[in-house]
Amino acid sequence: MIFDYAKRLFIFFLLTLSVFMMFLTVNAANAEGDKVSGDTSSWTFPVEGMITDSYGTRSGSHKGMDIGGDIGSPVYSVAKGKVIKSYLSDTYGHVVFIRHENGYETVYAHLQSRLVDENQEVAQGQQLGRLGNTGRSTGAHLHFEVHRGEWTIDKENAVDPYRVFGQGEVGQLVFAKEKDPFQAVGVSGTPESLPNEHVAEGVHIVHKGETLWGISRQYGLSVEEIMQKNALKSSGLNVNQRLMIPGSGSSPEGQYVVKQGDTLYSISKAQGIDMDELVSRNDLNPASAIYPQQVLKVN
C-alpha cells in the first residue's frame, strides 16, 4: 500500500513538472515574439510618403511594406548598421541590405539609385539612396522589409513592419526619420464645423489624418516652404490648425492632385487627356498604382 502511494505521488510530481516546463516554454516563446517592438523601439521610417501595400498581401507572398512617394525622394536607414549588400537586382531593382546591431536585417528595394557600398557602416537616418521604380515594380515606391535574423531567399525570417512602427493601414501618410505614423493629433471640434466664409484665402485648415507632406503635395510646395511660412519647428500638426499657404493656395497650373477613388482612366476623361498621353507625361506604367495626393501632369 505504501508502495502504491509513493508511486502515485511520483506520477503526480512528474505531471506537475511537465506542466511547469510547458508554462516556461510558452512564456519564453511569447517573450521572443514580443522582442520585435523592444529591440526596434528607436527605429524611424525610411522614407516620406504613403503606405500603398502591407505585409502578407498577395496571398501571403508580400513580405514587406510598400511606401509610395516622389521619385528621387531620399531613403534613409531606419537604424545604425552595416551595409551587407548593395547591388542591382532583376527583381528588387537597386537594393540595399542593412544588418543592424540587434541582429535584424532591413531591405530597401526598387531604388532609383544607391549611395552606399557593401561593408560600409551607416548611422540611423543616413541616406542610403533615392526612391525609384526599378526592378519588378509597377510604380514609384520603396519596398521595405524587416527580417529577424538573416535575409533568406524564402524570407523565412521576415516580420511585419507594423510590429516595429505600430499598426498602420494602406493610405496612411508617413514621415521619414520619424517613428509615429499618425502625424495629425485630434482636438475638440472638426474641420467641417468651421464655416468656409471664415477661412481666409491662402489658409489651409488641417483635417484629421493630414500631414505636412500631404498638404505640401496638394499645393505643389515643399514641406520646408510651409514650415518656414508658419514658423513651425516640427512636422506635427493639430486638427483644425490653420496654415498659411505661400502663393495662391491652389495646385500649379497643368497639374492634377489625385483624390481617393481616382483611376488613370477617370482622370484622363475628366481632364480631357488621352490615357496613353497621361501615362507618358508622368512616366507611369499603365498598371501603376496611383494614390491620393499624388501630383500628375495633365497638360
Image (cartoon, grey):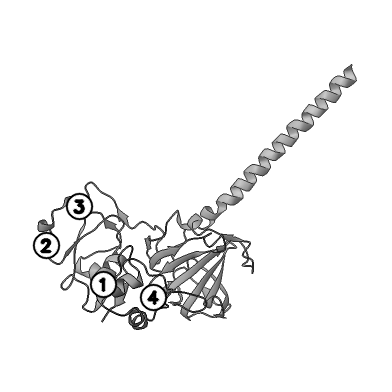
Q: Residue 244: x percent and y percent?
A: 17, 65
Q: CA distance from mark 3 to mark 4?
A: 33 Å
Judging by the rendered image, the residue that carries numbered circle 4 is 73
Give the amino acid at mark 4. Answer: Ser
Task: Please report the residue visible at 13 percent of the width from the left and 59 percent of the height from the top.
Answer: 199
Task: Please report the residue visible at 38 percent of the width from the left and 70 percent of the height from the top.
Answer: 290
Give the amino acid at mark 2. Answer: Ala
Q: CA distance from mark 3 to mark 1?
A: 27 Å
> Of label 4 and label 2, which has the lower sequence position?
4
Task: Please report the residue visible at 53 percent of the width from the left and 58 percent of the height from the top.
Answer: 160
**Where the C terminus falls, by quadrant?**
bottom left
Which image quadrant for residue 288?
Answer: bottom left
Judging by the rendered image, the residue that carries numbered circle 2 is 200
Q: CA distance from mark 2 to mark 3?
A: 15 Å
> Of label 2 and label 3, which has the lower sequence position?
3
Q: CA distance from mark 2 to mark 1?
A: 28 Å
> Of label 3 and label 4, which has the lower sequence position?
4
**Is the Cβ of the residue at disc 3 closer than 8 Å to that at disc 1?**
no
Q: Nearer the viewer, residue 280 or 80?
A: 280
Give the amino acid at mark 3. Answer: Glu
Judging by the rendered image, the residue that carries numbered circle 1 is 270
Horizontally, is 157 left or right of 255 in the view? right
Q: Residue 182: x percent and y percent?
A: 36, 56
> Of label 3 and label 1, which has the lower sequence position?
3
Task: Please report the residue visible at 71 percent of the width from the left and 39 percent of the height from the top.
Answer: 21
